[in-house]
Image (cartoon, grey):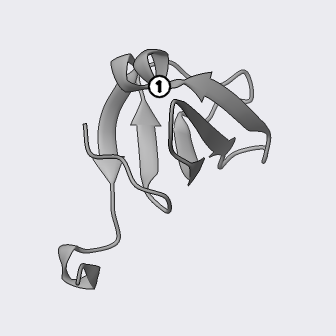
Amino acid sequence: MDVRVGDQLQMKKTHPCGSNVFDVLRVGADFKIRCTGCGREVMVPRHKCEKNIRKILRESAGDER
């Protein structure tokens, strides 16, 4: 799955604050994501995070070089 820093992830499950959209801060063996609702940052193993992604939200495809 092609997840990049700066993407927003819409997850299948909601965060306890009620939001299900997270910003990607770091990509590697673990993902560091920040909840857009409350601002909490979480480190999640890659396979667990990729399994729970519903949709990847990007600004636009024209930003690639």
Total numbered labels placed on residues in the image: 1
Q: Is residue 43 left or right of residue 26?
A: right
Quarter of the N terminus within the rendering = top left
Report the residue at 37% width, 25% height from top.
50
Instruction: Give x and y (percent) for residue 23.
Output: 56, 51
**Circle 1 SS class:** helix
Instruction: Give x and y (percent) for residue 26.
Output: 59, 49
Quick one: which residue is furthest to the front in this view? Answer: 29
Q: Is residue 13 left or right of residue 36?
A: left
Locate residue 18: give its quadrant.
top right
* Residue 11 vertical placement versus 38 (above, below): above
Identify which amino acid the numbered label 1 is placed on. Answer: Arg
* Residue 49 vertical placement versus 56 (above, below): above
Locate residue 11: give its quadrant.
top left
Q: Is residue 48 left or right of residue 32?
A: left
> Which residue position holds label 1?
46
Report the residue at 46% width, 52% height from top.
8
Instruction: Give x and y (percent) for residue 17.
Output: 74, 29
Report the residue at 29% width, 39% height from top.
55
Q: Is residue 43 left or right of residue 40?
A: left
Few, some or many C-alpha atoms within 10 Å of disc 1 (few <14, some 14-19, many ≥20)? some
Quarter of the C terminus within the rendering = bottom left
Locate residue 63: give its quadrant.
bottom left
Report the residue at 64% width, 40% height from top.
32
Instruction: Give x and y (percent) for residue 21.
Output: 52, 42
* Residue 60 vertical placement versus 35 (above, below): below
